[in-house]
Image (cartoon, rainbow, N blue to C red):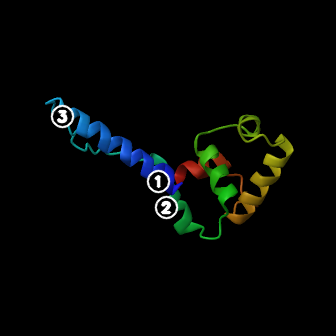
Amino acid sequence: MKRFLYSNNERIISMENEIYSKGGDVIVEEEVSIEKPADPFDEFNKRLFLKYPDITRNEKMLCGFLKLNMSTKEISVITGKKEHTIEIARTRLRKKVGLTKSNVNLNAFMDSI
């Protein structure tokens, strides 16, 4: 790998010398910094983690899907898991966030976080 990098540097120097010898100018482009747009789920993930610090990565991903009002079938297609597996994950998530004896819709609950 070192040899490859070294040989590329040699080529660049050789090309620069060739440009200078022909009287050309080397154009150096200014570095442009592009600010990435704010991620709307960033705040959601922070609030979710503050309320439920023991939530797993998969549960966090499920919460994101639920926040987007996705159905179990849609989530199963995207994740490649069976619908039954998603239903079990939803049940475990309801238990973890304390919604086991509540009639609150899990999607609506995620929307309120």
Circle 2/circle 1 CB separation < 8 Å: yes
Q: Which mark is residue 46?
A: 2
Which corner quadrant of the image does residue 51 belong to? Answer: bottom right
Q: Which residue is mark 3?
A: 21
Q: Which residue is mark 1?
A: 42
Pick the quarter of the image with the N terminus. bottom right
* Apparent side of residue 29 relative to residue 53 in the rendered image (left or right): left
Circle 3/circle 2 CB separation < 8 Å: no
Q: Residue at x 70, y 60 (%)?
A: 99
The spot of residue 104 in percent (x, y) is 67, 51
Q: What amino acid does circle 1 point to?
A: Asp
Crowdedness near tag 3: few (<14), some (14–19) or many (≥20) residues, C-alpha within 10 Å: few
Kindly state the secondary structure of the residue where label 3 is placed. Answer: helix
Q: What amino acid does circle 3 point to?
A: Ser
Q: Residue at x 72, y 34 (%)?
A: 74
| Mark 1 or mark 3, earlier in chain | 3
Crowdedness near tag 1: few (<14), some (14–19) or many (≥20) residues, C-alpha within 10 Å: few
Above or below for 106 versus 27:
below
The spot of residue 38 in percent (x, y) is 38, 47
Above or below for 109 versus 65:
below
